[in-house]
Image: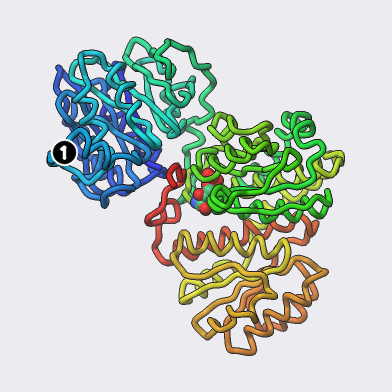
Amino acid sequence: MCGIVGYAGGRKAAEIIYEGLLRLEYRGYDSAGIAVLKDGKISAVKRQGRVCALGGYIKDMDGKLGIGHTRWATHGSPSDINAHPHSAGKFTIVHNGIIENYSQLKAEYFDGEKFTSETDSEVVVRLLDKFYDGDITRALFKVASLLNGSYAVAAVCTDFDGVAVIKNKSPVIIGYGNDGNFIASDAPALAGFCGEISFLKDGDCALVTRGGVSIFDSAMQGVLRERVKNSATNASLDLNGCPHYMLKEIREVPASVVNTCNAYSSAEEKLKSVVSGCDRVIIVGCGTAYNSGLIAKRYIEKFARIPAEAEIAGEFRYNRPVVTPTTAVIAVSQSGETADTLEAAKLAYSLGAKVVAVTNAPYSQLTRCAHAVVPVVAGHEICVAATKSYTGQIAALYLIAHTLAGRDIGEATQKLFKISRLCESAIETEGIDSLAHMCARSVGTYFLGRDLDYAVAVEGSLKLREISYIAGGGYPAGELKHGTLALVDENVVAVVIITDKRLADKSMNAVEQVLARGGKVAVISNIAETEKELQGRAQLIKIPDCDENLSPLVSAVAVQLLAYKTAVLLNRDPDKPRNLAKSVTVE
Ligand code: AGP
């Protein structure tokens, strides 16, 4: 949520920062700004809108060090004034996070003074200016000691030939380049600029200059943070001929399944020892990650016969959860940064549960709140809507369920390899275009299913709502008649997922109930009998026949494509849906 970039080196800073911000836009895209320092003077530009709104100003911004920001508004509407950077005296800053006590700080230190913006961030730069005594590091630590909340604050000061940064909860990486050094919220910003990066810890402050990087821990002692290879490369940012990242990433679903399987062995032994003796499992996550938890619950109960429940992380953390040392809490998060999921994991840890992180971000904060980490290897996911990370999560959770069951994962892995090939053919599924037209014309599209198909229905609905802005929901097919059926008319579409032979007849009841009331129905299925029964009365999307436990991987591709195509028909930007951002680092 919000992306920051900083650079100090031998090249034109504004150009490098602009490029970095474009790559971080998935973190927020309602306004953007850049500040550069040259000859002791700071020049800044900030504009409401996407990063490209800054494009025309870059050529006039000279200076070899600076900072930039792409915003997802928390305090104050998206506007030129509220856009970052913010300045006071010798300082200019960009901020990612929320300062929870900003109004108290304003009242205590700046009573009666007029602030320029409505942001929480402005108080930080004013405090820096107030406490600055010639030592930037000391000023940053002093200000940080006053702040409650989450922050990655990058600052330039007219007295200092570099960029200073301090962080708590919000992520900051340091990049080591050939011609200068960097800071950024996430690795893709530095792809092609830095082969090596390191991750700051909470409380760390870093001074980044052209000549080097100095890092201080929260005790203000100099420290070294491990340098690792930057996994983001120019190739990971390439659209590979696709018009949008979402389509490119759906095409990478098969690879996410295979790569996640291949990485599982590195985590298996540790996982076994951590979950040994656990008699209950709670899977926590938000959005799509929670939806993969709905699938995991079913896998774990089915294979391991251990009671399992999926809980939304933001609910779990506030409902005084009952956990014991024999409870395993599996925290699922693509980014490993989601505030609610992190807090849920920390809470579970503090209550004595065994915490397992399932994440696509190997160095993320979530990995530091867990006893064991199971990697999802989906590669960098740029589109705000999660696609390949969801299927990677399902693959990882399927294997975890086998480990919990005490089974060898060899056979399960082979099944996943096989299904990855079916996912590949599902990308070519016919009929999705015409269903997308139907959904695009609807006033509401509802997804129905039973058991695993229900879990995918919930995800399919989220995906469609998120990027096409069509109202809807995902419901158990049996629940239809308990309320949702009232919504059905000729302007509403019901998408029913049927891949479970055992429950196909029951799910067909829902199809009949909608048809009987003049509603429009589409069925996503791989069951021959379903096709016969439909007799052309509803649109049928045929997906490949497969192992019924793994059908969510195949039907996920179908619902992701449906959402994508519907959004494109409606002229929505599927990569950057309105009001959203990818990494939700605030509550
Ligand atoms: C999915 O399409 C969404 N963008 C969103 O629900 C996302 O899955 C959620 O915010 C959780 O993110 P995380 O996996 O990074 O924790």
- Image coordinates of residue 504 in percent, x first then y, are 77, 73
Relative to 194, say whether 299 is above or below: below
Kindly state the secondary structure of the residue where label 1 is placed.
Answer: loop
Relative to 490, say whether 230 is above or below: above
Relative to 123, say whether 82 is above or below: below
- Image coordinates of residue 29 in percent, x first then y, are 34, 47
Relative to 464, say whether 399 is above or below: above
- Image coordinates of residue 97 in percent, x first then y, are 37, 39
**Left or right of 462 in this view: 573:** left
**Is residue 145 visible in the rendered structure shown here?**
yes
Amino acid, disc 1: Asp
**Is residue 249 visible in the rendered structure shown here?**
no
Mark 1 lies within 8 Å of ligand 1 (Cβ measured): no
- Look at 25% across and 23% down and name the residue there: 156
- Look at 77% across and 50% down and name the residue there: 300
- Image coordinates of residue 26 in percent, x first then y, are 42, 44
